[in-house]
Image (spheres, rainbow, N blue to C red):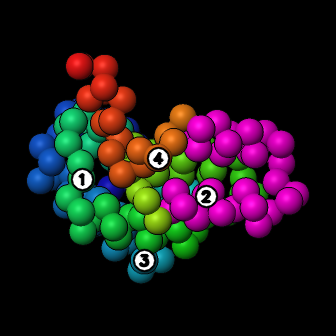
């Protein structure tokens, strides 16, 4: 599927179908069938629909996404950083979140706008990266 087809999907999609869609996009990206920019946009759209399910994505798929995003993480593009941060937070991706935190220590010449976005996200998430629904659970109490 391309980004336009994904954008036009309904907001709510059964989790089983979402799992297949995530797997398909991961496979296409790993096989160099889609560019990184398109992959990230599609992943972002699928993540938005996964969030609407109010349940964690299946762990094997989540781990695959986590490892994949960890490999492509860089601090060169604000748009990429913004998209990846959103996916990481909304899917609860621990490996990539830790890599993001490490990037603050490793890269001294990160653009201020990107640096602020990363720091703000880290501050908001705190230690609750593995549970994207943490704030909702506290809100309902």
The secondary structure type at the circle numbered 4 is: loop
Mark 1 = which residue? Answer: 57
Residue 93, image x and y in percent? 41, 57
> Depth-wise, is mark 4 or mark 3 nearer the camera?
4
Name the side, left or right, on which 20 lies relative to 73: left
Residue at the top extreme?
140
Does dot 3 land on a helix, a strand or a loop?
helix
Q: Main secondary structure of the magenta part?
A: helix
Task: Calculate the distance from the C-alpha at mark 4 to the C-alpha at mark 1.
Answer: 19 Å
> Can you say which quadrant of the picture contains the N terminus?
bottom left
Q: Residue at x 20, y 59 (%)?
A: 58
Q: Is residue 75 left or right of residue 32?
A: right
| Residue 36 spot, x, y in % from top left | 55, 63
Mark with earlier residue (4, 2): 2
Q: Which residues fall within the magenta stretch? A: 96-123
Q: Do the numbered discs 4 and 2 sit on residues whose CB atoms are within 8 Å?
A: no
Q: Is residue 11 left or right of residue 27?
A: left
Q: Is residue 86 visible?
A: no
**Residue at numbered disc 4:** 127
Q: Is residue 82 above or below residue 134?
A: below
Q: Which residue is mark 2?
A: 100
Q: Which residue is mark 3?
A: 30
**Residue 68 numbered mark, or none:** none
Specify which label sits upstream in the sequence, 4 or 1.
1
């Amino acid at each position: 599927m391309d980004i336009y087809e994904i954008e036009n999907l309904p907001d709510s999609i059964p989790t089983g179908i979402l799992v297949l869609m995530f797997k398909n996009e991961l496979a296409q990206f790993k096989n160099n069938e889609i560019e990184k920019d398109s992959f990230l946009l599609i992943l972002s759209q699928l993540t938005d629909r996964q969030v609407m399910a109010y349940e964690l994505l299946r762990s094997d798929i989540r781990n695959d996404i986590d490892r994949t995003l960890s490999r492509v993480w860089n601090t060169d593009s604000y748009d990429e950083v913004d998209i990846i941060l959103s996916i990481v937070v909304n899917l609860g991706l621990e490996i990539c979140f830790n890599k993001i935190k490490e990037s603050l220590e490793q890269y001294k010449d990160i653009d201020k706008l990107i640096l602020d976005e990363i720091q703000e996200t880290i501050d908001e998430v705190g230690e609750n990266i593995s549970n994207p629904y943490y704030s909702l659970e506290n809100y309902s109490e």
